[in-house]
Image: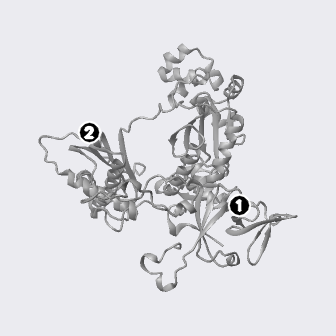
Amino acid sequence: MIRTFEKRAEQKISGFQSPAADYLEGRLDITEKIVIDPHATFYFQMQGNTMAGYGICDGDILVIDRSLKPIEGAFVIAFVAGFFNCRLLLKDKQGFFLKNDSDIVRETEMEVLQIWGVVSSVCRNVLPKALRTGRYKDVCTL
Amino acid sequence: MFALCDCNNFYASAERLFRPELNGKPVVVLSNNDGCVIARSEEAKACGIKMGDPEFLVRDLIKKFSIHVFSSNYVLYGDMSERVMHNLSRWFPRLDVYSIDEAFGWLGGIGNLDTYVPMVRNSVVQNTGIPVSIGVAPTKTLAKLANKLSKKCGGVMVLDTDEKISAAVKDFPVSDLWGVGRQYYKKFQELGITTAGELREMPEMWFKQHLTVMGQRMWNELWGRPAIPLDAVRENTKGITVSRSFRNYIEQPDILAEAVTLYASRLAEKLRREQLRCLYLQVFLYTNKNREDHPQHFPSYTHKLLLASNNTTDLVSIAVKVAQRLFKDGVKYRKAGVIATGLVPESELQLNVFAAHDSGKKDKVSAVLDKLNLAYGRGTLRMATEGFEKKWRLKHEYLSKGYTTRWPDIIKVI
């Protein structure tokens, strides 16, 4: 992603000009590593632990990039039987299927395989409960 | 070559993107205050629902065909529109956004349109999830026409040869032409002209004489000669309006003041965003003209400011004073609004000899207001006269969530 503007407050210098002034760069911004195409990116949230075996836990925020092509081995958001599901997309001789810890749904069991988008990354709050207070309550969760 | 890109049944499509179970089902979106139908999915059109139908008149149809109803969720539509326009702008050397769901693109220097345009469409549909149609032609009028036709053949229509254009205009109804309103349509009907093909066969002089220069432009455009440049339609803003219907009738001046405070605050915000100040502030009130048993009152008053202003404090205090003066006891008001006219750029403030101006201070307050509301969400800091209960607030019973703009509203997956 292109850095559009530097998020740095202007410093009013009262004494000496900083020797670093000529060498300033924009500070790192984590969204550059998480959101590649902001105009194709959506956020969903995982509910429940049916994907825990694949490292996606309850409460995780999923970053969905619709511009990506869903291929074998990708975690995808699929719309199955009236619900949005996060699943691993796999393929064998019989065709595509969706998998999580407990079950497998074959393409043939659905009218159409409705893939909404590809999960490009997962954001999780790893703080212990005691630290999840105040401003830190909602780190990577809601 | 020009391309007209527009989103198919935009509001309905935006709602369905987050409710895929409604794909293939009839969906309608209602206007502010859940008044009229302003968007329909194809299936809803087939059920006989017309654009602009009042909700209470189609209630039976809605029930009969179990049509899904949404209140208008402009937060969602605004964000989805921005996504569509950004995605489109990657493909066109120039893109002029024409409305929330339409944009004119310029395809200068791009060859092989027959493969390029479908590529554009696929990419935008994939990235945003919103179905779009693209019509391409040498003029804007024809691009608009191609766009209409494209909806029936996969969402892309390129009219790049005279033969293709002739075939396209041949049966195209004049009433669907860009720029044909009721007046023009009446004239065409009198002459028995029903298709765009027939229309363009008329001599140029006839257009000039009967339809002024606009008609002459249309004639040229129909023959594939560009007469409307890319940004010709855009005009300078002449006035900015904020007006809304109330949920229930307002019969007390205090409550009216609350509503008007909110509208004037929003107006001031809009002016500041456009870096404009207004010299005139108009306030108007409406009663429900369909209720003949109610006393009717449609007062309006335009206040001239001594000094052009865009700060919330000034505009709110004027609007409230005017509204309370317009208010009559015993009348049930249905709608109110504020209009800013006499707009001048912020940089061209003309001072008044006879007025003391301390507005620098108020401008600073307004700037702080904008900053806080940007950081913490709209309405965090507001004028106290806006009140807290807001019983007059718009009705939106079937409002969907801010799926893409509010963290608590993002979609949960299992």
Q: Nearer the viewer, residue A131 or B412?
A: A131
**Viewport quadrant of the C terminus of chain B:** bottom right
How far separated are the C-alphas under marks 1 and 2?
A: 54 Å
**Viewport quadrant of the N terminus of chain B:** top right
Residue behind mark 2: B348
**Subunit ID for the residue under disc 1:** A
Residues at badges 1 and 2 in contact (C-beta under 8 Å)?
A: no
Query: Is residue A90 visible to the viewer in this orientation of the structure?
Result: yes
x, y percentage for residue A76?
A: 69, 65
Q: Does residue B109 sit above or below B252 in this rendering?
A: above
x, y percentage for residue B8?
A: 62, 46
Which residue is pictured at 60% across the width and 33% down the height? B107
Q: Which amino acid does label 1 sit on?
A: Ile
**Subunit ID for the residue under disc 2:** B
x, y percentage for residue B133?
A: 64, 42
Residue furthest front as drawn:
A19
Q: What residue type is labelled 2?
A: Glu
Horizontally, is B128 left or right of B333 in the view? right
Mark 2, other Cα within 10 Å: few <14 / some 14–19 / many ≥20? few
Which residue is pictured at 50% across the width and 17% down the height? B208
Horizontally, is B127 left or right of B214 in the view? right
Which residue is pictured at 71% across the width and 35% down the height? B114
Residue furthest left as drawn:
B354
Give the secondary structure at mark 1.
strand
